[in-house]
Image: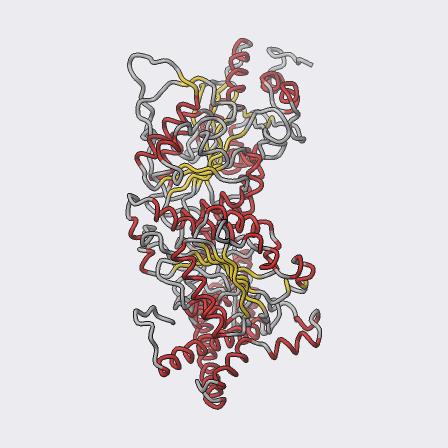
Amino acid sequence: MIKEKNNTTLTFEDFKTEVLNDYKIAMTSRECSLLGRREVLTGKAKFGIFGDGKEVPQIAMAKFFKNGDFRSGYYRDQTFMMAIGEFTIANFFAGLYGNTDIKQEPMSAGRQMGGHFVTHSLNEDGSWKNLTKQKNSSSDISPTAAQMPRLLGLAQASKVYREIDNIPNQRNFSNNGTEIAWGTIGNASTSEGVFFETINAAGVLQVPMLISIWDDEYGISVHAKHQTTKENISEILSGFQRDKDNKGIEILTVKGWDYSDLITTYEKASRIAREQHVPVLVHVTELTQPQGHSSSGSHERYKSTERLNWEKEFDCLRQMRLWMIAINIASAEELAEIDDAIRKEVLEGKKAAWNSFITPIVEEKEELVSLLQKIAVSSKNKDQILRHSNTLKGIKDPLKKEILVTARKSLRLVVNEDVASELSLWIQKYTQINQATFSNHLYSESKNNIFSVKEVLPTYPVDARKDTDGRMIIRDNFDALFAKYPEVLIFGEDSGNIGDVNQGLEGMQEKYGETRVADAGIREATIIGQGIGLALRGLRPIAEIQYLDYLLYAIQILSDDLASLQYRTVGKQKAPLIIRTRGHRLEGIWHSGSPMGMIINAIRGIHVLVPRNMTKAAGFYNTLLECDEPALVVECLNGYRLKEKMPLNYGEFKTPIGVVETIKEGTDITLVSYGSTLRLVELAAKELAETGIDCEVIDIQSLLPFDINHDIAKSIEKTNRLLVIDEDVPGGASAYILQQIIEQQDAYKFLDSKPQTLSAKEHRPSYGTDGDYFSKPSIEDIYEKVYGILSEANPAVYPKLY
């Protein structure tokens, strides 16, 4: 590991020691890659993508990575992680084997394939560590270029901390905003739209972001001529180059095999980013990939003989060796001895990692074998049980799956025998332990999760004040939150200067400044990325996506990055980002969609809240800012001008998450809905009451999580009928709602009529008032659907309408 030095003057011996140490780290990483591929081919590991060919530039980059800095990279960065002291040989192989022990495999406890790196930002109780005292890496994901939006936010956090000095515990997150956010990406991935979106946003925001592009001319088998105009990403980005008259990005290029020039280049790049607070791009060219893209194929299939020969010649480790010999750092013989010692060290590390992984599983296997042999003695199916036992016993390196499959198949053979209970209990215990190992931490398990906040009702004056527009409720509540929480900031399209398109932030920028209430360009993916990065560094961002439909531009980042963050880090990182948007019941194809089914099934891991009015929405924001979890809040687009009572306790009243609200009690049927459509349900219920049909109306309020108290099932137990009304497409959110009620809450046993749904049409809503009426559920649709259910049950009282 290269340690930070106060004295930069080195003797030749110091220089020699440092260079040799760099070479040892690079060589260790290379040997891990080579041996890792062999482990995949022998079947001990499943799949591997390695960092061979990128070792020397990563060594150079690591020299200037300081405590407090953050990395947002991709799956080739193993050398860098080794160089900063956050990744070992044992960690490498534990990740390759999928070891589920977080102490052995601290990157993801086997939840991601090897090559996905992370440092732990949280203590065991979910509280923040002091991030300025450690080198930090945000958790990697595989989707190409998806690390870029998050990188923008990590860099912006330094700018925020530089400009605001009254944030609680600020010294744990930043040293006066001097941190750099370091990004890495392969040259082929720069073809992705989010790469260009991030580069543009960084140039606009002027944040200390240092992005390295590892360029080996290929994206798997596809050459750069099919990837990049002019086959040169830094050349086509040259229009972003800053100059004396215009802000922009500093762009540097360097050859990936030139150790000395790489150090000079990264020293310059880091100095510019850290001191001048501007984005810097380092295009590292002429890199190689000695083993090809991954363990699943050979690059000999698509590279020419000339290219393969060139790659052998300009392998960065070979060139470093030649340079070291040329300037008398070491002789060829001395380097050969170093290489041999490293190979032995890596081999021993591999063996130790394998033993740590397989030994507990073998012990579990032996425990089950012993149990099966015991119960076989008194079973009528003794021979079959012993066959299962002997087959499992013969597996030298068993999987947990093979153990559990054997146990479950054996249980079938003793199901009616006395010995069944012991095996059944063993299976349940084994499953419970291991299922948690693979499935926990999708949501926060800390004391600050959403269930830790209790409901606080809005308070109102005794003398009734005038009702006000809903937008005033949300605005005044945001005002209270900005005053209460210095770490809260909001940004999005039209959020700043005009106070958002519906005036819910009116006057907030003028009052709290452009850093905390900011306009952003039309770039949804990086708006979400800003939020993720800022939240990873201890701030409380609210990222505003102007309309619900526009969320689709960012759904990949939400789904692959934010939603899985707690899960893939096993609770070692968190990003409590709040996404604010508005939707439902407008007129036209592009601003009135309600793709809730798509959203809730893509972003499990993020709470999805659907308040029916602005008081409820404000209560959700108040709740969320006391929690450590991400959430999406969908405000009703047609609710900003509707009248609501003005609360007295802005910033304090709290809407509980996961709890439904019964708006109207009834005895004949339970009507379940949310958001804008709920108002139509209430009106339809009034009209149905005139016919003698008494509806119970329930506001879902929260789709993720859903009705944690099972109040809907309690309602159905009383009414014996259910209708779900939703403005998503047929089978969208309504299918999820029905599954939760019927399957999770077991409400099927209370039903006397078929449970039904009423949704929008399959197409997008058409333009105009008539388009809305014929596209989404209307009051008449709801009335007639409910009437039809009651007519089927009691046609004498409710004769058919049609």
Which residue is nearer to you in this view: 699 or 234? 234
* Residue located at (39% from left, 55% from top): 572
Q: Position of residue 105 (x, y in %)?
A: 43, 64
Answer left or right for 322 relative to 616.
Answer: right
Which residue is nearer to you in this view: 57 or 83? 57
Which residue is nearer to you in this view: 641 or 215? 215
Q: Quadrant of the N terminus?
A: bottom left
Q: Quadrant of the C terminus?
A: top right
Q: Is residue 482 above or below residue 62?
A: above
Taking the view exactly as shown, the residue that stands out farthest to the front is: 245
Taking the view exactly as shown, the residue that stands out farthest to the top is: 690
Q: Position of residue 332 (x, y in %)?
A: 50, 89
Q: Is residue 412 above or below residue 608?
A: below
User: Can residue 730 be seen from the camera position used here?
Assistant: yes
* Residue located at (52% from left, 40% from top): 521
Answer left or right for 91 relative to 132.
Answer: right
**Which corner quadrant of the image does residue 348 belong to?**
bottom left
Q: Is residue 465 above or below residue 202?
A: above
Q: Position of residue 6 (x, y in %)?
A: 30, 69
Disc count in the image? 0
Which residue is nearer to you in this view: 407 or 318? 318
* Residue located at (54% from left, 65% from top): 253
Q: Position of residue 192 (x, y in %)?
A: 60, 52
